[in-house]
Image: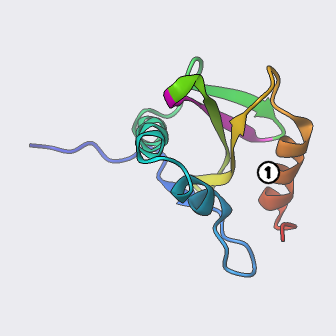
């Protein structure tokens, strides 16, 4: 069996304090939801580049992985591509139609290394 290499390996953003906020957020989710997000991120790793319905550009070098969780919930993982890697910057369960600007701004700060 020959395994295809990941086209865009995923890495968790790590703050200067050593925190990995997306890993912490995912670990706080139900097991079924963790599995869904993990599968969606894996699909991006092996199939990059790809677009809707799984991935959407947010502009400014940010992208979102779009996941449908259990119970009708919707989650997003915002990432950027840096040095051939998918850097997972921010994750959240979506409560509004549009991706909130505060979530985009937080991801941008993390991308620039200005996070907590």
The quarter of the image holding the N terminus is: top left
Q: Main secondary structure of the magenta part?
A: strand
- Above or below for 87 versus 48: below
- Residue 50 visible to the viewer: no
Is 108 colored magenta in this rendering? no
Percent from the top left, x then y, of residue 94? 72, 32
Give the side of residue 58 with respect to residue 67, left or right. Answer: right
| Residue closer to the observer: 101 or 31 | 31
Query: Residue at horizontal 79%, vertical 60%?
Result: 110
Give the side of residue 25 with respect to residue 35, left or right. Answer: right
Neighbor class of circle 1 (other Cα within 10 Å; few <14, some 14-19, many 20+) is many
- Residue 51 visible to the viewer: yes
Query: Residue at horizontal 44%, vertical 44%?
Result: 38
Is 66 colored magenta in this rendering? yes
- Above or below for 109 versus 57: below
| Residue closer to the observer: 84 or 19 | 19
Query: Residue at horizontal 57%, vertical 60%?
Result: 23
Percent from the top left, x then y, of residue 81? 64, 48
Quarter holding residue 65: top right
* Residue wearing tag 1: 107
Query: Residue at horizontal 82%, vertical 67%?
Result: 113
The quarter of the image holding the C terminus is: bottom right
Q: Which residues are magenta?
A: 61-70
| Residue ranking furthest to the front | 71
- Above or below for 49 versus 16: above
Percent from the top left, x then y, of residue 3? 21, 45
Circle 1 SS class: helix
| Residue ranking furthest to the left | 1
Percent from the top left, x then y, of residue 19? 67, 74
């Amino acid at each position: 069996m020959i395994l295809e290499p990941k086209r865009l390996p995923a890495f968790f953003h790590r703050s200067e304090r050593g925190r990995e906020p997306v890993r912490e957020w995912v670990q706080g989710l139900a097991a079924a939801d963790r599995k869904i997000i993990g599968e969606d991120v894996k699909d991006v790793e092996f199939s990059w580049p790809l677009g809707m319905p799984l991935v959407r550009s947010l502009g400014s070098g940010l992208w979102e992985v779009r996941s449908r969780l259990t119970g009708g919930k919707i989650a997003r993982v915002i990432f950027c591509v840096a040095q051939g890697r998918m850097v997972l910057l921010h994750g959240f369960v979506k409560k509004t139609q549009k991706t909130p600007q505060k979530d985009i701004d937080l991801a941008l700060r993390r991308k620039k290394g200005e996070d907590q």
